């Protein structure tokens, strides 16, 4: 070995710096290897939410939750049948999640709870209508010095936290939203005067983790892609081969290697194998999410699970977008009043106000029966006057290229809109009329849209009586193409409750751990609430480092 460390982490997403930071607090050496030129992974590009039930902030706010309640929710929703979802893993996630939060707070990471962010299935037993969502406080990237430019940019840099940005979206209808925009505007003016570089969402979470990691002495390297896992005669993982500055280096890992290199969202060959019909052109995963560590794990005999699962996010694809652009995510737009989603036959086939992952699962399932990729978001002028669309401000004036390319269709009647979309006019007219009847009776008899707290959360609270239902009746009418995009994949290494990687026969590959989107998710095929990927990435990173270090401490004590 040309170098040796106690612990090596492959990839720099959610749980990477958490694991490395814990190792350093225990007096162990830690190396984080990131193959791209930016640290932070897809986590830095995300909203930065961690779904952590029964966390200390809930207790401080007087919000009732418990381990038992959260277990009931996961057991009913997720089950125990899939490789990533055994009961002992869910139990460990809930138990260690609380400890992980306390650890990060002890290291100076400023976290807080979003006050109102219902679970995505809040009406299921054990679901929460308040919030189990934890985020980091916004951060001035100037505190990172030269490392600030090595951090992967988030989706929108401004001095506003995620929950504040979510509130700002209804500014056409809400004085609370207007007031929030005014406050954020004042912060922006102050930041410009003081030369501050505020970051938010996942970027501020990863910025705070980076700051703490550097302070603790974690060795972090960019442009350092791992090409091979090294094993000894017993099959134990003993280190990695990494390409650093164009040179192959063998680096030893005395206690273990943690894989947190994402999945295969940017690898069309793997998509065609594991999730046919999906496209690399529809993902918002980071550029390094190309799957080679999954394939390296397969080479050394690691078991893989949930390989057909995507963290779906419905997306609009305006003309002129590049693959590495952040594509407009449409889930909250689909939940607003005056709109429905229909397949290519003009039939409405789902409850639009559900989680982004469930929307895309429904699209893929529908497409097996009726062409539904892309589907059409049907809306009217009332919608455009009130709400944002594909990243543009409210208003009916949209880029002419949208219409010229066919991304958006426009017509004076629903029947003519159907013709523009090559849909049977009678079918679409029937669907719109039926939905308008549901709106007037304030009850969606087909899909029960608006009956769950989460439905109302993602709608427009100023729209009465339903935050998510409104008639589609004001001409002109519009149709927007929606595809089942994603934020990454959710299939990979099968791990136990200690984040150790398993073989197909259930035995453990000693010295190898995994977390994040490199693993078969503990959430199975569901997304229980906001942050159900970032939360597990942090928790299993923490668990892996603790297990590796404790095993070493026990061995030393026995000598």
Image (spheres, rainbow, N blue to C red):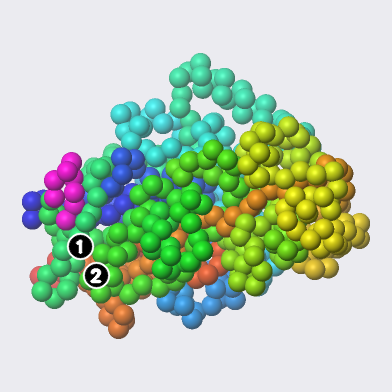
> Rounded to the nearest whole Å, what is the CA distance between mark 2 and mark 1?
9 Å
- Residue 45 lies, with reference to residue 429, above or below; the image says above
- On the image, the x and y values in percent for residue 482 come to 63, 53
> Are there few (<14), some (14-19), or many (20+) residues within 10 Å of tag 1?
many
- Counting from the top left corner in percent of width and height, residue 507 is at 27, 80
- Secondary structure, magenta segment, majority class: strand
**Residue found at x 16% / y 56%:** 241
Label placed on residue 299: 2
Q: Secondary structure at mark 1?
A: strand
| Residue 469 visible in this rendered orientation of the protein | yes
Identify residue for label 1: 229
Tell me the quarter of the image containing the N terminus: bottom left
Q: Is residue 72 rendered magenta in the image?
A: no
> In the image, is residue 247 part of the stretch drawn in magenta?
yes
**Percent position of residue 22, x then y:** 30, 53
Residue depicted at 64% across the width and 65% down the height: 371
Quadrant of res 437: bottom right
Please state the horizontal and vertical placement of residue 247, each as a whole percent of the image. Answer: 13, 46
Q: Nearer the viewer, residue 491 or 75?
A: 491
Q: Residue at x 37, y 29 (%)?
A: 143
CB-based contact (under 8 Å), mark 2 and mark 1: yes
The magenta span reads 241-248
**Which residue corresponds to the image point at 54% horizontal and 59% vertical from the top-left?**
312
């Amino acid at each position: 070995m040309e170098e040796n460390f106690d612990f090596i982490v492959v990839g720099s997403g959610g749980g990477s710096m958490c694991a490395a930071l814990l190792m350093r607090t225990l007096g162990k050496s830690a190396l984080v290897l990131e193959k791209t030129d930016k640290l932070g992974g897809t986590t830095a590009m995300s909203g930065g939410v961690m779904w952590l039930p029964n966390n200390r902030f809930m207790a401080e706010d007087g919000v009732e939750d418990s381990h038992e309640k959260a277990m009931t929710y996961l057991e009913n929703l997720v089950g125990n049948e899939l490789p990533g979802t055994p009961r002992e893993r869910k139990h460990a996630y809930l138990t260690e999640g609380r400890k992980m939060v306390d650890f990060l707070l002890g290291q100076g990471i400023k976290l807080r709870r979003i006050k109102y962010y219902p679970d995505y299935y809040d009406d299921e037993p054990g679901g929460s209508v308040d919030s189990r969502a934890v985020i980091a406080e916004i951060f001035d990237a100037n505190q990172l010095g030269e490392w600030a430019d090595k951090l992967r940019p988030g989706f929108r840099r401004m001095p506003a936290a995620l929950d504040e940005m979510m509130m700002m979206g209804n500014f056409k209808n809400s004085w609370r939203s207007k007031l929030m925009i005014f406050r954020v505007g004042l912060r922006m003016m102050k930041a410009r005067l003081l030369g501050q570089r505020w970051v938010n969402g996942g970027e501020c979470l990863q910025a705070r983790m980076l700051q703490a990691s550097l302070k603790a002495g974690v060795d972090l390297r960019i442009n350092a892609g791992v090409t091979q896992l090294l094993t000894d005669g017993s099959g134990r993982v003993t280190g990695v081969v990494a390409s650093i500055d164009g040179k192959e280096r063998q680096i030893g890992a005395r206690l273990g290697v943690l894989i947190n290199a994402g999945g295969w969202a940017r690898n069309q060959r793997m998509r065609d194998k594991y999730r046919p019909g999906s496209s690399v052109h529809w993902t918002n995963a980071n550029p390094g999410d190309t799957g080679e560590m999954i394939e390296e794990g397969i080479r050394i005999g690691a078991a893989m699970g949930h390989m057909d699962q995507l963290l779906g996010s419905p997306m609009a694809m305006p003309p002129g977008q590049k693959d590495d652009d952040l594509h407009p995510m449409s889930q909250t737009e689909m939940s607003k009043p005056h709109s429905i989603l229909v397949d290519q036959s003009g039939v409405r086939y789902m409850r639009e106000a559900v989680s982004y992952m469930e929307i895309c699962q429904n699209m893929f399932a529908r497409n097996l029966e009726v062409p539904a990729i892309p589907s059409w978001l049907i809306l009217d002028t009332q919608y455009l006057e009130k709400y944002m669309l594909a990243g543009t401000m409210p208003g009916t004036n949209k880029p002419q290229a949208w219409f010229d390319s066919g991304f958006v269709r426009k017509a004076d009647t629903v029947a003519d809109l159907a013709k523009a979309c090559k849909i049977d006019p009678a079918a679409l007219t029937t669907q719109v009329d039926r939905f308008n009847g549901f709106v007037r009776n304030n009850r969606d008899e087909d899909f029960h849209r608006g009956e769950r707290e989460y439905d109302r959360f993602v709608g427009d609270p100023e729209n009465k009586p339903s935050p998510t239902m409104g008639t589609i009746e004001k001409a002109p009418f519009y149709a927007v193409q929606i595809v089942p995009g994603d934020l990454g994949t959710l299939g990979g290494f099968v791990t136990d409750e200690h984040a150790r990687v398993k073989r197909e026969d259930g035995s453990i590959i000693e010295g190898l751990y995994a977390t994040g989107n490199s693993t078969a998710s503990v959430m199975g095929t569901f997304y229980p609430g906001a942050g159900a990927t970032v939360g597990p990435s942090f928790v299993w990173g923490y668990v892996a480092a603790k297990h590796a270090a404790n095993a070493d401490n026990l061995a030393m004590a026995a000598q």
